[in-house]
Amino acid sequence: MHYWVRASSSDFAGTLPQPRSGHTAVIIGGSKVVVFGGLLEKKFLSDIVVYDIDNKLWFQPECTGGSDGQVGPSPRAFHVAVVIDCHMFIFGGRSGGKRLGDFWVLDTDIWQWSELTSFGDLPSARDFAAASAIGNRKIVMYGGWDGKKWLSDVYVMDTISLEWMELSVTGSLPPARCGHTATMVEKRLLVYGGRGGGGPIMGDLWALKGLIEEENETPGWTQLKLPGQAPSPRCGHTITSGGHYLLLFGGHGTGGWLSRYDIYYNDCIVLDRVSAQWKRLPTGNEPPPARAYHSLTCMGSRYLLFGGFDGKSTFGDLWWLVPEEDSIAKRLLATSPTNLPQNKDVVMGNNNVQSEGKESQMEESLFQIVDELEDKEFVQLASSLVGERVYSNQQVSDIQALRDHWRKSTPRHIPLKEVGPLLRDYQRLITRRLQANDGSHMQFIESSFPGKVAYGFYHIRNVNQLRMDDIPKLLAEYKQLLPN
């Protein structure tokens, strides 16, 4: 079990980084996290902010090096950053409407920037590419957007000779994309998701071989279709390597069927390298707000989430994701012990939970279900289905018409704007059965309908916690609740 804990002032000393998205945050030598660049309200950033892990200190180093009177690279976001030893290499990105193709390195021992003059097969200027280190000498970069087209090229950079080489890959190729992730896992580069040519958001996973010279393999792509609870398609997510698994968090996708809506995610999904399958990471409390183009950095058993964007706001918050035995998790549980869920597969919010009292008091604080006639969005949806009504008794028939509409609907015919009212009505109907049942709420929720359909979404506090592939199951459970 892991817990999300918003970082408190006691966790850090120094000046915290300002809010941003599209930045990079890399860990160097296991001792420091280096944040560079990003975007804040149309302003592109070029600052370096460092977190000293051992001293729990944020600071801004005095960097040297640069050109034209400016220290370091020009302001940018959506660039790539890769670490080799104590050096952070930066390529490309965007500043305003301009895509960049310059190549920089920061020596983090002396905080000195150098612009690198490389040669060979130089990659075109681009943003939203993804890159990873190959061992302790080379960098591999894949894809991106050059302002006119999505890219599917692969480049390898030798950081000693400063030579770029475009990799010639035979066989089937993944669709061109940007906003994806690229992560070296042993001898393979794993690429997941992104936005593709024509704009669709993808949820495919590809592996590239032939990057290790000693293996003498012909470069080639293979699409991987792994079992388990795979992520929904997305771009702007992060994949962070931690031990024997890769942790995917957040990102941006689209929802709806008849109409398309932007949707941002805050789910944690693990790619287990040992069993080669996708899994949900069990978390014991509500996750941070959904976001994309954030950073998530692994520091031993801890992860540090920073920044991002949710379509409206740029975040500057810092969150820990820690195992339950971590002192940070113990701090959370000591202040609100009832945040512990009864079922580890159910994510429960930690707002308004009483830290003492009987189970009935806990139920009351967790499940404040709004009556139909007080649920304005629900009533408006019902009225719009059959026309505007005035009298409350007519509203009741409108509500029944809405429920009948959902009873007859398939998941493909539920637009995203109806999912929130549907979820709340689902929880309302369960609560009424619970009250009629006069039993323990957890025993009741964990019991099954005929056909073994469980109440799997009763504890969901916010519709944003649902994945798109949860909606068919939610609708099926809802139909079971409706009277015949």
Image (cartoon, grey):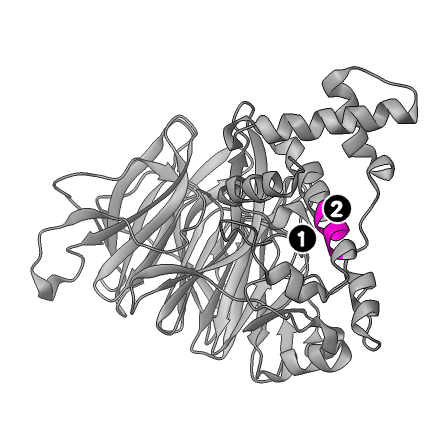
Q: Gap in Å between the C-alphas at discs 2 and 1?
A: 33 Å
Q: Nearer the viewer, residue 105 or 256?
A: 256
449 with respect to 12 (left or right):
left
Q: Is residue 122 above or below residue 200?
A: below
Residue receiving disc 2: 428
How crowded pointer 1 is (Cα within 10 Å; few <14, some 14-19, many 20+) is rated as many
Disc 1 is placed on an element classified as loop
Disc 2 is placed on an element classified as helix
Q: Amino acid at mark 2?
A: Arg
How crowded pointer 2 is (Cα within 10 Å; few <14, some 14-19, many 20+) is rated as some
Residue 284 position within the rendered picture, expressed as x and y whole percent measured from the top left: 61, 69
Q: Main secondary structure of the magenta part?
A: helix
Q: Residue at x 55, y 26 (%)?
A: 413
In front: label 2 or label 1: 2
Residue 116 position within the rendered picture, expressed as x and y whole percent measured from the top left: 35, 55
Q: Nearer the viewer, residue 412 or 277?
A: 412
Q: Residue at x 61, y 33 (%)?
A: 416
Residue receiving disc 1: 315
Task: Determine which quarter of the picture holds residue 370.
Answer: top right
* Contact, mark 2 vs mark 1 (Cβ under 8 Å): no
Task: Determine which quarter of the picture holds residue 421.
Answer: top right
Which quarter of the figure is the C terminus placed in? Answer: top right
Q: Which residues are magenta?
A: 428-434
* Label whose residue precedes the other's in the sequence (2 or 1): 1
Does any portion of residue 162 appear in the rendered image?
Answer: no
Residue 376 position within the rendered picture, expressed as x and y whole percent measured from the top left: 83, 34
Residue extending farthest top = 387
Residue 307 position within the rendered picture, expressed as x and y whole percent measured from the top left: 62, 56
